[in-house]
Amino acid sequence: STEWFENVARYVNLPPEQFAYSLLTRSQRISHENLRLRDRDYVERYEDWIAERAGVRRAPATMPIPPMFTPFTVRGVTLKNRVVVSPMAQYSCLDGLPADYHLVHLGARAMGGAGLVFAEMTCVSPDARITPGCPGLWNDAQRDGWKRIVDFVHDNSDAKIAIQLGHAGAKGATRVAWEGIDEPLEEGAWPLISASPQQYIDGVSQWSHPMTRADMDRVTADFVQSTRRAAEAGFDWLELHCAHGYLLSSFISPLTNLRTDEYGGSLANRLRYPLEVFRAVREVWPSDRPMSVRISAHDWVEGGITPDDAVEIARAFKAAGADMIDCSSGQVSKKEQPVFGRMFQTPFADRVRNEAGIATIAVGAISEADHVNGIIAAGRADLCAVARPHLANPAWTLLEAAKIGYLDLPWPKQYRAAKMQLERNLERERAQAAQAAGLSPLEQANRAQGV
C-alpha cells in the first residue's frame, strides 16, 4: 500500500476510473471479488466500463462481463479473452518433432477456454535444446508437425496459438525433468555456448563456451529460419525467450555476461545481441502478427537484473518493435533467493506496463479468476498467463467462469452437457453453504442477486 503512494506517478496516466480502482486494490489484499462484497454496484459499473473500453457491451438482463473475459487486440490478432496458457516444458518430443502428445496437450487447453495458448519453448537448432525431449523448429518435418497442431486449434476452438522460440545456451544438454532437472546428460551431450563461460550448477553442469561473432551469426540465422517456419505453420503469435538464464538471457544479466567487448559491460551493450536477434526475427515475422518478449525482470541475486533494469529492457525492446513484454523472473542463478507468494511477479508487469508504456503479460502464482480479474481491472497487466492450474485442468478457464457465476462464456459444443451439470452442481453447493450459514431461501436469493 505504501509503495503505491510512493510511486503514484507511475499511475497518473491511467484513466480516472482505472486510477481509482488501482487505488482501492493497491495492496491486492482487497481483491476484485472482495471489493464486490463491499460495493456491488460500483464493481458492476466498473466492469461495464472495462468492457466498453474493450469494445464490447453486455446484453440486456445479463451480468457484467468480467474483465478477464474482455477481448484484447494486438496488431491483426484479437484474443477472445485475457487468459493465456503459459509456455510449459513437457520434454515429450523425439528429435524435436511435435506429435500426438502435443496435439492432445495443446488442443485440450485451446478447447478449455483460454484466449491464447503457448507452445513450450521451441528450439531453433539441435544444440539449442534444454533436453533431448524438447521440441524444435529447425526442419520442415517439425514445421509440418506444428502445422497439424495449429490447424487443430484453429478448427476446433476460437483460441489463438503462440510459439515461443529460444536457445538453451549454458542450460542445455540436461536430463528431462523427471530424471533430474538441470542435471547434465550422462551421455549424448552436445557443446554449449553462452555470453561468457559458465556452469549453471557449480561443479556439476557442463561448462559453456563464450560465443564468437561466427556463433552469433549462426544462431541469429537459426532464429530467422525457425521464425519463417513458424509463420508457415500458421502460428498467430511469436515470443522471443530472453529469460531464465537461457542464451539470450545470458547476455542481458550481468551475472552471466562478463564480456569485455561491445556485447558486455553496460546494460545497453548487454542488450545488443538479443536486440540483433529480435530485429532479425521481427523482420521476417508477418507484420500483422504480434511478437512478445519474455524477460527475467528480477534475478533475485545481488548484482543481477533488478526491476529498474527491467523497465529499461522493456523500453529497448519496445523501440525495436516488440508488442508486449512477458514478465517472468529468476532462474538465472542457482544462488537466487526469490520471494514467492500469490501473484508474486505481477508487480514487475505493473511497473513495465505503466513506466515503459508497453503492454505486458503477468505470470506466476496466478491461480483463480479473482486474481486475473483484479490484475486486468487495475491495469497491472493486459494478459495473465496461467501455468500449473492448466496442467491440472485443461478447462481451467471454463471452470473459473462457472465458479464466479459467469454463464455466458461459450463452451465447445461437445462439452455443453458438462457445462449444464457443472452449473447445477455449483448452484447446489452455494445453496448448501447458505443453508449452513442459517440463511432462509429468500435471503439466499437476495445474496445471489447482491441485495
Image (spheres, grey):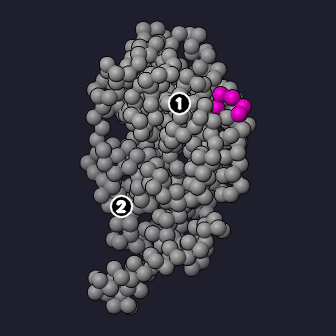
Residue 188, given in percent of the width and then of the height, sits at 51, 22
Q: Which mark's residue is nearer the viewer, 2 or 1?
A: 1
Q: Is residue 79 left or right of residue 392?
A: right
Above or below: residue 409 compared with residue 146: below
Q: Residue furthest left?
A: 2
2 or 1: tag closer to the N-terminus? 2
Q: CA distance from mark 2 to mark 1?
A: 43 Å
For the residue marked with disc 2, what is the amino acid? Answer: Ser
Q: What residue appears at the point 42 percent right and 11 percent down from the top-left corner?
A: 259
At label 1, the amino acid type is Pro
Q: Is residue 297 or residue 434 the one in the foreground?
A: 434
Label 2, on which residue?
Answer: 31
* Magenta region includes residue 138: yes
The image position of residue 441, as x and y in percent, is 38, 90
> Which residue range is magenta in the image?
137-141
Query: Looking at the magenta stretch, what is its main secondary structure?
Result: loop
Residue 434 visible? The answer is yes
In which quarter of the view is residue 28 placed? Answer: bottom left
Element type where label 2 sits in the image: loop
Q: Examine the structure image and report whether residue 253 is included in the region drawn in magenta.
A: no
* Front-most of residues 431 and 278: 431
Give how far across and how far down residue 436 sits, in percent: 29, 83
- Label 1 crowding class (10 Å Cα cut-off): few <14, some 14-19, many 20+? many
The quadrant in which residue 350 appears is top left
Q: Quadrant of the C terminus?
A: bottom left
Mark 2 in CB contact with mark 1 (< 8 angstroms):
no
Residue picked out by circle 1: 132
133 is higher (above) or lower (below) than 382 = above
Instruction: Let me know if residue 68 appears in the view.
Output: no
- The residue shown at (28%, 34%) is 337
Nearest to the observer: residue 263 or residue 210: 210
Q: Secondary structure at mark 1?
A: loop
